[in-house]
Amino acid sequence: MTGSEVPRSFRLAYVPGVTPTKWVRIWNERLPDIPLALVTVSAAEAPDLLRDGGADAGFVRLPIDRTDLSAIPLYTETTVVVVPKDHVVAAVDEVSAGDLADEIVLHPLDDTLDWELRPGRPANARPDTTADAIELVAAGVGVLVVPQSLARLHHRKDLTYRPVLDAPESRVALSWPEDETTELVEDFIGIVRGRTVNSSRGRPTPPQPKRERPDTGGARRKPAAGKSTGRSIGTSTGKSTGKSPRSGSGGPKGGRRGKPGRRS
């Protein structure tokens, strides 16, 4: 990608409940010359936003229609039931879907959980959003089953939540148009996957200039013929030390090991 093709910013979409703060901070540290613009989008609208070019990449909730989109699953969330603090469910640590059989379980239109058989009894009408459903829970109309991050996002002092053991889980993924896997998208994938700045799959680092060797005044001179440097091992100096290289100074080192022979 040439300098003229580099976009002015990188647009990152994210659905409610996802907190991209950490990845945005790393992006700003590594690519300070390319601003990252955040785009909030509902879970239902996120795939079409990416297809229409409204964002370069985005955090979505699976499952989605993968037509023309690439996706990397990142993590799976615990599913919880949101209830008033004085509800009987608040007295236990966790529940099963069967424990909600007698409850009115709200089903907002933006729900992303893939149920085969929804628990509890349905309400007379479906709330438009999860935020609307939370208001109904606070009013005592019913309970709500959602990914834990959404329960935290819509936290209220008069509500609490408990894990639902056998409920479907929500998976969060990074997605982007498969025909638009640009260099910047690859950079962001590397950040999300925890690659270091010098990773071979990340943005290539510029080549470092070769360090010139200092001038030492020419190559080391060889000693002249017939002259000794005094450093050669085993070279005779014309003087005898009177010591054998095997026996040293006449001590036991270098001698033959074993028991001494018996004298005749």
Image (tube, rainbow, N blue to C red):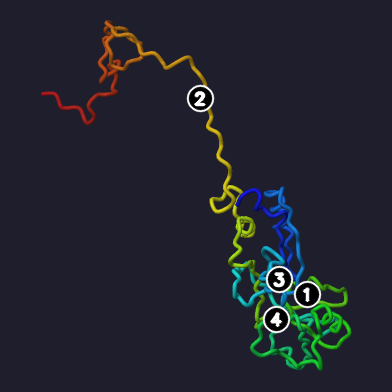
Label 1, residues with CA under 10 Å away: few <14, some 14-19, many ≥20: many
Label 4, residues with CA under 10 Å away: few <14, some 14-19, many ≥20: many
Q: Which residue is mark 4?
A: 164
Label located before the other in sequence (2 or 1): 1
Circle nearer the viewer, 2 or 1 = 2
Determine which of the numbered discs, if any, sits on residue 151 in the image.
1
Q: Report the residue that reaches farthest toward the front.
A: 4
Callout 3 secondary element:
helix
Label located before the other in sequence (3 or 1): 3
Q: CA distance from mark 3 to mark 4?
A: 31 Å
128 is higher (above) or lower (below) than 30: below
Q: Relative to 261, is 113 on the left or the right? A: right
Q: Residue at x 53, y 29 (%)?
A: 211
Circle nearer the viewer, 3 or 4 = 3
Q: Report the residue that reaches farthest toward the left.
A: 264
Q: CA distance from mark 3 to mark 2?
A: 56 Å
- Residue type for callout 2: Arg
Determine which of the numbered discs, if any, sits on residue 49 in the image.
3
Circle nearer the viewer, 3 or 2 = 3
